[in-house]
Amino acid sequence: MKTLDVFSARDLRNRAGGLLKDAEDGRFSVITKHGRPAAIVMPFDALLLELGAHRNLAVRLYAQRLLTLAQAAKLASLPIEQFLDVLGISGVNVVNYPAKEVRAELEALR
């Protein structure tokens, strides 16, 4: 699972290349100042243009399982039902069962 990289304001001088690489790879990064989040760096791509910053962030954090469905919908300022539509448009699976659990469920149904 991808996670967010954290860069301090002081790191930016030495690690700007890493910050840009993360964005190019489709990853979000957080920039902190005095240990507190100050900014989010996000990839500039079609999803950002289509959904806007809040919904793009919500979709990506949900896809990385860093937010629950309810949390992501709230961040996107959408009811869960509408956020499910946004996930579908974005190509993000809503149900994420491990293969082992799916097999166990199928066996239980037989």
Image (cartoon, rainbow, N blue to C red):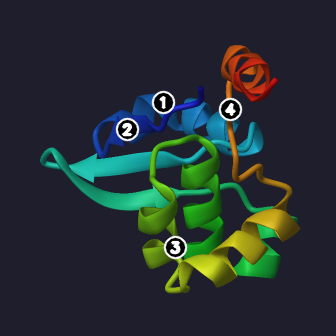
Name the residue at 75% across, 74% down.
86
Q: Earlier in the sequence, mark 2 or mark 3?
A: 2
- Decide which of 66, 82 is in the foreground and name it: 82
Residue at mark 2 to residue at mark 4: CA–CA distance: 33 Å
Q: Earlier in the sequence, mark 2 or mark 1?
A: 2
In this view, the mark in front (2 or 1): 2
Residue at mark 3 to residue at mark 4: CA–CA distance: 20 Å
Residue at mark 2 to residue at mark 3: CA–CA distance: 26 Å
Q: Earlier in the sequence, mark 2 or mark 4?
A: 2
In this view, the mark in front (1 or 4): 4
**For the residue marked with disc 3, what is the amino acid?**
Ala
Q: Crowding near pointer 1: few (<14 within 10 Å), some, many (20+)?
A: some
- Horizontal and vertical percent for residue 56? 65, 67
Q: Which residue is mark 4?
A: 97
**Quarter holding the C terminus?**
top right
**For the residue marked with disc 4, what is the amino acid?**
Tyr
Name the residue at 75% across, 37% down.
25
Mark 1, secondary structure of its residue: helix
Q: Which residue is mark 3?
A: 73
Q: Which residue is mark 1?
A: 15
- Decide which of 7, 17 is in the foreground and name it: 7
Q: Are marks 2 and 1 in contact (CB under 8 Å)?
A: yes
**For the residue marked with disc 1, what is the amino acid?**
Arg
Q: Are marks 1 and 4 in contact (CB under 8 Å)?
A: no
- Decide which of 81, 7 is in the foreground and name it: 81
Q: Is residue 51 left or right of residue 89?
A: left
**For the residue marked with disc 2, what is the amino acid?**
Phe
Kindly identify which numbered label has been placed on residue 7.
Answer: 2
In this view, the mark in front (3 or 4): 4
- Decide which of 85, 77 is in the foreground and name it: 85
- Horizontal and vertical percent for residue 17? 61, 33
